[in-house]
Amino acid sequence: MRHFAAVILSSLLMPMFAAAQAPYRVAIRAGKLIDGKGDKPIENALIIIEGDKIVSVTPGGTPPAGVEVLDLSKSTVLPGFIDTHTHVLLNGDITAEEYDTQLLKESIPYRAILAARNAHMALSHGFTAMRDLETEGAMYADVDVKMAIAHDEVPGPRMQVATRAMTPTGMYPLLGYSWELKVPTGVQYADGVDGVRKAVREQAMYGADWIKYYSDRRYHFEADGVLHSMVNFTDEEAKAIVEETHRLGKKVAAHAIGSDGIAAALRAGVDTIEHGDGLTDALMDEMAKKGVYWVPTITVGVYVAPGRGSNWQKMADLQRDNFPKAIKKGVKIALGTDAGGFDWKVLNQAKEFEYYVQYGMTSMQAIRAGTSVPAELLGWSDKVGTIEAGKWADLVAVSGDPLKDITELQRVKFVMKAGVVFKKDAN
Ligand SMILES: [Zn+2]
């Protein structure tokens, strides 16, 4: 209501104060600019911002008279980072015990308060947009977090959210409790073609931008050396989820770790494969051909392996081996960390960039995987992901050269979102 009233008021006053209401302009002098498009940084760039948008980017140049200049001449400026796989409502689940405790002992309001804190931390680490991929039992609270950020009530990245995610009955925790107890579930259980269609409609009704489902569980290596898994939905159900979601103009993310789960998700026609540890050459070829994104979430895989034991280390190793193959085959790789699967306070999401370079990307490829590629995944290529005229003024700066040392991205000194400076540390 407040916003509604403000709009009316400003339109009434408009004729009188039109001249005084010119949007605020600010200029940034960047020592080096990695704009997310060019192959080389632009030296001594001048970025002019008007309101929440970038109006021009030029090498050299003089700022217009009377415009405030933010001096980042000793820094490298980059587009704001984008993480396409997070859980703001979760705070670590290395063990099943940790996960169960959050669902059983923490109220959804308490978890939402922590989610606001997590979103704040993500923004201070340079993440100006995120796709949050399910609330893990916190129902539709991600829609509330997204709304509070969008209304400027709390600081955080721009968000697209998936709400509850789904599996068939009994295929996701909480499990193992007495049948006499009614315990919460980490996802929405949905069964049958009509059941999954209804779940998609319900989640869309309450604000889901994406639909997420769990394609598989029980990951195990077999004698063929391939990582296999048990597939959750029948093909008819999975296809119905995708068809219904696309019919509503939204997209589908599938959690798929084993090769069987990935194959089933690709048969169903999903838009993104989450984790994808068990990718085979044939599956990578299929993803490249169909333009399906791979969101590898390496940070969480490496982090939870020691705590989870059994196959998890082998799965992390497999992902490391697959990564350079996927690059070579032209699979679209979008940065995603699974933050929340690890404690937000322990790891900086920007660690993911470091793994991408370690596993075979150039620094520039890694930067694009966390800026322009996810912008495309989100359907926001015209708004974020690069620094150019017409885009939202979402940008970050670091003191060193990330092309020489990618870990610089874990030490972001300056963050601007929608033209507003959120963080400015001394160099
Ligand atoms: Zn996840």
Image: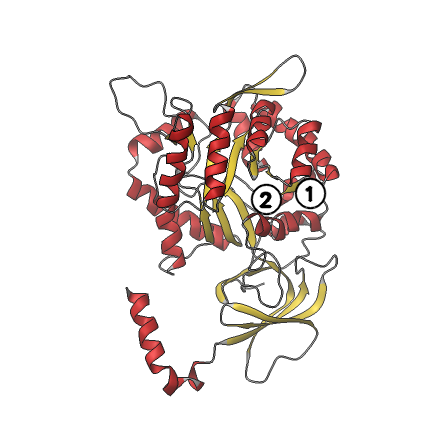
Residue of label 2: 335
- When the figure is inspected, residue 224 is found, relative to residue 4, above or below; the finding is above
Q: Is residue 301 above or below residue 248?
A: above
**Which dot, 1 or 2, sits closer to the camera?**
2
- How many angstroms separate mark 1 from mark 2 (CA)? 12 Å
* Image spot of residue 386 (x, y percent): 62, 59
Residue drawn at x 48%, y 47% is 249
Q: Quadrant of residue 426?
A: bottom right
**In the rendering, at what x and y percent does residue 296 appear?**
59, 36
Instruction: Count neighbours of disc 2 (C-alpha within 10 A) and say few if under 14, some if 14 to 19, many if 20 or more.
Output: many
Are the two marked residues, 1 and 2, in contact with CB atoms closer than 8 angstroms?
no
Residue 195 located left or right of residue 426? left
Q: Is residue 342 visible?
A: no
Q: Nearer the viewer, residue 177 or 303?
A: 177
User: Residue 206 location in percent, x, y?
Assistant: 35, 45
Which residue, given by chain and number where applicable, does mark 1 sit on? 357
Is tag 1's residue or tag 2's residue first in the polypeptide sequence?
A: 2
Q: Quadrant of the C terminus?
A: bottom right
- Closer to the camera in the image, 306 or 197: 197
- Residue at disc 1, secondary structure: helix
As drawn, is 321 to the left or to the right of 180? right
Residue 68, can we see it? yes
